[in-house]
Amino acid sequence: MSGVTWVALVALLALTAPSAATAQMLTIAETEDLVRADYFEGMPQEEAMRIGPAGAQRLVEMLADPEESRSQGQILLALGLCGSPDAMAAILGWIATPRTGEIDRDTFKAWQALPYALGHLARHDRRALGQLERLMHADAPDWTFRHHRGARLFRLARRAAANSLAETGLPEARGALDRAGQDASDARFQEHLQSLRALHAERTRERAE
């Protein structure tokens, strides 16, 4: 399984996992350990949901720290999962960071995690849905990573953003998917959107239950 597919699968598994029961908040040290650890099947969602205000503030600091670049993908996901009021601004700051040329693997993995982090955050902050829709229509990045460049990056970003919108099950997300369906220039993506509408309906039923 390719690195791209594996990261997307892990993030989707986290996005669809059941909510954790209310538990004691993680300490700052526990929060740091959580996002710095290596996981075979992805960072535990239940643990990330226990991150409190102090831990979330530390994550914001870590996301802006080049020394923490190895953990940025998991930091983005953790910010989305914990739903901190400061998460959106921190994630937008990461998106706005200029990147050109060949980027490193850690930055690429964080870029892959970005739409799934926004999908988690949308449950707490509906502005994340708008950002996901913008990602779905954004131009290809200026940077490259190995054989990933141009149109390939555009397709990866668009599909990941659409997947994350569908997984939220939120009514506003369905609107974004329908608007994307008005562009008939890519038949394969339109077929994908059809399956995502069904997935969105399933997630909506699950939320209602």
Image (tube, rainbow, N blue to C red):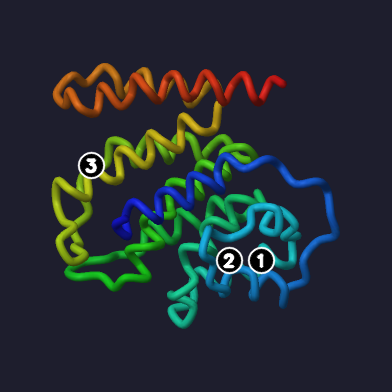
Residue 200 in the figure: left or right of residue 182:
right
Q: Which one is nearer the viewer's eye here, 208 or 41?
A: 41
Residue type, numbered disc 2? Val
Residue visible at 37% across and 22% down?
195
The quadrant the N terminus occupies is: bottom left
The residue that label 1 is drawn on is 57
Residue visible at 17% across and 23% down?
187
Q: Position of residue 82 (x, y in %)?
A: 67, 53
Residue type, numbered disc 1? Gln
The residue that label 3 is drawn on is 155
The quadrant the C terminus occupies is: top right
Q: Position of residue 184 (x, y in %)?
A: 18, 19
Q: Position of residue 154 (x, y in %)?
A: 22, 45
Residue contact between numbered discs 2 and 1, judged by CB atoms under 8 Å: yes
Instruction: Specify which label sits upstream in the sequence, 2 or 3.
Output: 2
- Disc 2 and disc 3: Cα gap in Å? 29 Å
Q: Residues within 10 Å of mark 1 (few under 14, many from 20)?
A: some
- Disc 1 and disc 3: Cα gap in Å? 33 Å
